[in-house]
Image (cartoon, rainbow, N blue to C red):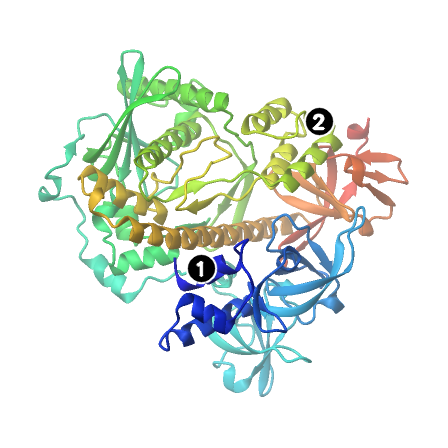
Amino acid sequence: MNLKELILNLVYDSDYIPMSKKELFSYLKVDKYTRKAVEDILKDLEKENKIRISNKKRIMPLTEEELSLTGKISIAQGGYGFFISDNEDFSDVFIKKDNLNNAHNNDRVKIEIIREKAEGKNAEGRVTNIIERANEEVIGTYQKNKGFGFVIADDKSFGDDIYIEDKFSKKAKDKDKVAVEIINYPKKGKPEGRITEIIGSKGDKNIDVLSLIRAHNLPYEFSKETKKETLYIDDSVSSIELNGRKDLRDLFTVTIDGRDSKDFDDAISIEKNGENYDLYVHIADVAHYVKKGSAIDDDAYERGNSTYLFNVVISMLPEKLSNGICSLNPNEDRLSLSLKMTVNPKGKVIANDFYEAVINSDYRLVYDDVNNFLDDNDDNIYEDELLKEKLRDFDKLREILSNMRKKRGSIDFNFSESQIDVTDDGKVLNISNLERGSGNKMIEEFMLCANECVASLFAYMDFPFIYRIHEKPSEEKLESFKKDLQAVGLNIKGSELHPKDFQQILEDVEGKDIEKVINLLMLRTMQKAKYSETRDIHFGLSTNFYTHFTSPIRRYPDLIVHRLLKKYIHNKIAKLNQASLEKSLSKNAEHLSMTERRSEECERDVEDLFKCKYMRRFVGDDFYGNISSITDFGMFIELENTVEGLFMYKFSEDRYDYIEETMKAFNADTKRFYSIGDRVKIRVRDVDMYQRNIDFDMEVDDEIIS
């Protein structure tokens, strides 16, 4: 525990009696050498709004109310904002534009409540203090004038244009995409900035995607040191590297991935063992090639994971590793960490073994073909009879494992996933609903089983480890979810919901118009999964043991797990300093949870961008979709191709009322009620490329109404 944590634990202890600085120094036995460090920590804690200094100069903990009134600002398109508290159970607070006190999007602020929450309305607040600015750097378009210029932020929620003196323009040209550092927030007038990077010209290839990459601070260039180290990586496995490894090259092995995949980090094998199955999950031995402390490792850790942006991929590892020697390419010797699991007919893993191994994959299979073979019974897809036999065995085991997870309450969401076909230069050819068949589900089941098996090993050893956890939903979110379910006619018994209850709800709505909506409402109820050095439940999977082991080419947490597992295999794990390891894993978990969120946010923004680019050509055209959400300002509607847009009441000639109790909308002119899940006909009204929003008009469809 560091000094900062020690002070916080002391101040927030239930028996703490507020101390002066002098009393704290005495309590901590601070000498003249550490006094300055403690004073700096106290200043930081006060600045971060984690403690307060009273009028009598006492170090005080914040009250629950004070903690709840500290958080972030989210600015909406209309210029107003919402305060999102650090306390997850505290409801969002509405902030008028005039009450933002010069706060910008994602700034950490302190607020005061000026109007309490009322039925159907958020509480209203006023920003009293800006604790920390979020946007030290903004991405936007430069507008050049004589002697000065402005940067217009791509993120319209930033609000203001940024004034740039000519000496800070970096000789940017008019309409260049740039990164700008904010150097001053004057009390009156526009923020002032300095251009730090010229990303490219407006017409450059994929400039819109590159701008989003920079906006999310995603590292996208490897260091010079990494490029140098990459030159010395061999293209093939040497005979020396096979020493001490289990030879599994004669084991029938396949990879199954998407048709466009280029990095294959998992392969599978199967053998019948009486009434049981021996399932092998082979994972690329990335840890053999990426050594801790190397430049490649440093870059990989900084990225945390690969980011997939359709026609642009930011790989965690250099291509020579990810698509080359680490990729389990067919008919080539590859080093692996292999897990053998013996699974009984009830889906329980009754034995397991871990190996440093060498494999040689027999086939590189793609999901579409496997799905056609298994789901559509197309026997002409493959000629190899052994391959067909193995695929049927895989599918039987998939069903066994799936049934086992379902019985224990694992939640299987059924979402519409977008298939977006994009050319290399960013043109969107088509958007459709991505279909998941038995092949996709098979790999998912086997990887889940392997991840759980590895987590169980370290949990039972009670050894420091990095887990993937998914905490229980908060009471407030559960109550809100129950209310939403009641509004759509689903009644839930009992005061507490378990994973099995959630799974039962999904089964009850399967195949109905409301299915997608219930999946979405349920997802919003869930906490965000994250990495942690402390073992906890994975609520969604209904298990106490889970980690990430199966994708070390594209996820750094898996690489950490591999390094620990290799120590275990070689009986060297007892030599590790557990206290030091636990401390580093805590830091790793926090950083890697952040990099994951960073990538997800960028991926979501790029997906929205491509959907807008695609739908621009359909302005004025009609489509059918289902209502996914109803609010007091409009209805969100998801089209059959997964594109979602908003129909706003204010743009309609008809009068609409929102009925909060039943989550319905009522057209007062046509006397029609609209419910979540209803199928409706819309017309594409407008596409806002800057905000990445799509607006719809509601159309009358006699066929649907009747």
The part of the image, by quadrant, that contains residue 512 is top right
- Tell me the kind of residue under disc 2: Leu
Residue 301 drawn above or below residue 399: below
Question: Residue at left 69%, top 66%?
Answer: 127
Q: Dot 1 lies on which element?
A: helix
Horizontal arrangement in the rendering, residue 398 relative to residue 246 (left or right): right
Which residue is labeled 2 in the image? 490
- Is any atom of residue 301 visible in this view? yes
Residue 269 in the image, given as x and y percentages of width and height: 28, 26
Residue 65 in the figure: left or right of residue 469? right
564 up-or-down from 150: above or below: above
Q: Nearer the viewer, mark 1 or mark 2?
A: 1
Query: Are there few (<14), some (14-19), or many (20+) residues within 10 Å of tag 1?
Result: few
Q: Which residue is at a point 31% across and 64% down the rendered structure image?
A: 223
* Kind of residue indicated by mark 1: Glu
Q: According to the image, label 1 marks what residue?
A: 5
CA separation in Å, label 1 and label 2: 46 Å
How many dots with numbers?
2
> Left or right of 176: which side holds 63?
right
Name the residue at 56% across, 64% down: 18
Marks 1/2 in contact by CB < 8 Å: the verdict is no
Q: Is residue 400 left or right of residue 78?
A: left
